[in-house]
């Protein structure tokens, strides 16, 4: 059914106008004032509301076997949560273990999504080992529509690769025109500091931060940047959390290294005192890199507003507080890492970023949609409001006032890291290729409608 969104305040990464948007066959076909609605058109009155391009989360975990357990969401639950929160496409990290073949891993992750997602999706292909067979499989995976890799400089023995593998992966990526996304923390420093802290009797969730202080992350970024400079590969630092790491990335950029920078909504609004909460409550806030000293928040907001930081993601990784986080009750190194936030990213970014005067609305759209699409080969199909673009649209109600609570969330996890937080504004209508998929906090879409987004290499 055709769709007409009338009289919205349409805001993109660099433009704004009060206008109508007409969508047919899943794409935007006309933009202008006073457009007709032929019989059979679904009409949405967006007067007094913003209309944004569908948001894209560039860093999500859904199928994630990790630290002796598995993240809780399935594509059904995660894609519902994404849509309710205004995210119409997501990029999941495909993370096979070092024991597994890359191609088998890719097919496993694809199988978890195909026919089960309500939103569109693609993957960053995890390179968790590198040898001749893996290289051949990675070439095949790129042929199948993947144009980004994911590597971990942390998680020794699980996903982490060594320096020779890092060098070879970046060389292959450069040859293929693939961008390499990277978790940057020095795994040797983490292992040594964990050992020291445990030996000194430190067990509580707050120890997690002290085992991975800012310099551990900054060293990881510097390390990646050195390898990127030598190979000429395009890189993207995921979940950058602190000033020290940002300084390293920006210094590399000034030297001509091609590097995108992602921060997370968690680092923008939470700080390390949350992970220091007593009675194991802090475990809800254990993730890697850890939540930082609050002084880093201003650095990250300023980095976003000046567009030095490219994107805001979630690194959504849901582990239950009651049954999974307690794996590390007596040893912080065993707490499954992750803070779920797929559903809340946009309302938090709007409330604590735009409404608080830290970023403008165009920067929000850029960091959570358009820039993501550009970096990862989805633009202008995604991340744009223009004729020919997919009709993924978010009609956003700036007058909504609400309070976050786990009781109302679609994410399949037993807590919210933002329990009781006030939000101002939320998605009122969310469309995926012209179909209304969420209304006012409720999923109304179709499981299985989400499509795999094939991406061509060499787009940046
Ligand atoms: O703590 C985190 N970030 N968990 C998910 C895995 C990762 O490192 O991205
Ligand atoms: Zn990571
Ligand atoms: Zn992650």
Image (cartoon, grey):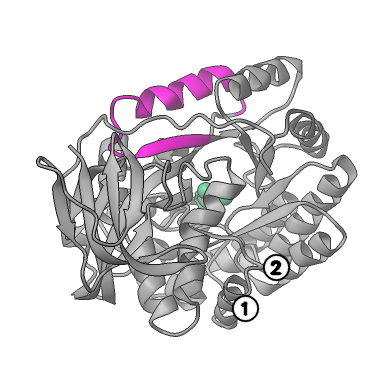
239 vs 326, left or right, is right
The image shows residue 122 at horizontal and vertical percentages of 47, 35
Circle 2: element type = helix
User: Residue 343 location in percent, x, y?
Assistant: 31, 56
| Horizontal relation, residue 78 to residue 236: left or right | left
Whether residue 395 appears in this view of the structure is: yes
Whether residue 222 is in magenta: the answer is: no
Q: Which residues are magenta?
A: 98-123
Percent of width and height locating residue 89: 40, 44
Residue 336 position within the rendered picture, expressed as x and y whole percent measured from the top left: 45, 50
Q: Which residue is mark 1?
A: 299
Q: CA distance from mark 2 to mark 1?
A: 9 Å
Which image quadrant for residue 61? top left
Camera sees residue 323: no
How many neighbours does mark 1 have within 10 angstroms: few (below 14), some (14-19), or many (20 or more)?
Answer: some
Q: Is residue 190 above or below residue 148?
A: below
Location of residue 131 (image quadrant): top right
Is 122 in front, or is 215? 122
Question: How packed is label 2: few (under 14 Cα within 10 Å), some, or many (20 or more)?
Answer: many
Q: Magenta segment: does it hold 99? A: yes
Relative placement, left or right, of 19 versus 202 is left
Q: Residue at x 31, y 64 (%)?
A: 19
The image quadrant where one finds the C terminus is: top right
- Where is the N terminus found, in terms of image quarters? top left
Task: Identify which residue, 232 or 48, lies in the foreground.
Answer: 48
| Contact between labelled residues 1 and 2, with CB atoms less than 8 Å apart | yes
Asked if disc 1 is less than 8 Å from ligand 1, the answer is no
Classify mark 1: helix, strand or loop. helix
Residue tagged by mark 2?
Answer: 246
């Amino acid at each position: 059914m055709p769709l007409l969104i009338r009289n919205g305040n349409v805001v993109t990464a660099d433009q704004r106008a009060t206008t109508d948007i007409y969508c047919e066959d899943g794409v935007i076909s006309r933009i202008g004032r006073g457009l007709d609605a032929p019989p059979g058109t679904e009409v949405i009155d967006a007067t007094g509301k913003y209309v944004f391009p569908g948001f894209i989360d560039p860093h999500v975990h859904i199928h994630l076997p990790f630290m002796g357990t598995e993240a809780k969401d399935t594509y059904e639950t995660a894609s519902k949560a994404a849509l309710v929160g205004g995210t119409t496409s997501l990029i999941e990290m495909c993370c096979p273990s070092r024991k597994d073949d890359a191609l088998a891993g890719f097919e496993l992750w694809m199988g978890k999504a195909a026919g089960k997602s309500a939103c569109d999706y693609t993957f960053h292909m995890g390179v968790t080992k590198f040898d001749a067979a893996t290289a051949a499989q990675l070439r095949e995976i790129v042929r199948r529509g993947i144009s980004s890799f994911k590597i971990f400089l942390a998680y020794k023995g699980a996903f982490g690769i060594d320096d020779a593998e890092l060098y070879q992966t970046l060389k292959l990526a450069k040859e293929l025109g693939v961008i390499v996304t990277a978790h940057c923390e020095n795994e040797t420093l983490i292992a040594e500091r964990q050992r020291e802290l445990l030996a000194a009797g430190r067990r509580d969730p707050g120890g997690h931060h002290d085992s991975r202080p800012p310099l551990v992350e900054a060293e990881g970024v510097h390390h990646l940047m050195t390898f990127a400079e030598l190979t000429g590969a395009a890189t993207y630092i995921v979940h950058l959390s602190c000033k020290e790491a940002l300084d390293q990335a920006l210094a590399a950029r000034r030297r001509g290294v091609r590097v995108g920078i992602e921060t997370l909504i968690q680092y923008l609004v939470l700080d390390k005192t949350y992970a220091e909460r007593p009675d194991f409550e802090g475990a809800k806030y254990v993730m890697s890199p850890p939540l930082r000293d609050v002084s880093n928040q201003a650095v990250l907001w300023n980095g976003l507003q000046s567009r030095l930081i490219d994107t805001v993601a979630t690194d959504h990784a849901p582990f239950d507080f009651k049954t999974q986080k307690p794996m590390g009750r007596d040893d912080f190194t065993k707490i499954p890492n992750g803070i779920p936030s797929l559903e809340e990213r946009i309302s938090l970014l709007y409330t604590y970023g735009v409404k608080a005067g830290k970023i403008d609305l165009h920067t929000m759209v850029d960091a959570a949609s358009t820039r993501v699409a550009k970096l990862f080969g989805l633009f202008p199909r995604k991340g744009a409001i223009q004729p020919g673009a997919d009709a993924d649209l978010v009609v956003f109600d700036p007058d909504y006032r609400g309070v976050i609570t786990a009781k109302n969330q679609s994410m399949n996890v037993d807590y919210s890291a933002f329990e009781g937080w006030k939000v101002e504004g939320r998605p009122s209508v969310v469309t995926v290729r012209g179909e209304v998929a969420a209304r006012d906090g409720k999923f109304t879409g179709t499981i299985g409608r989400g499509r795999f987004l094939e991406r061509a290499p060499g787009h940046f």
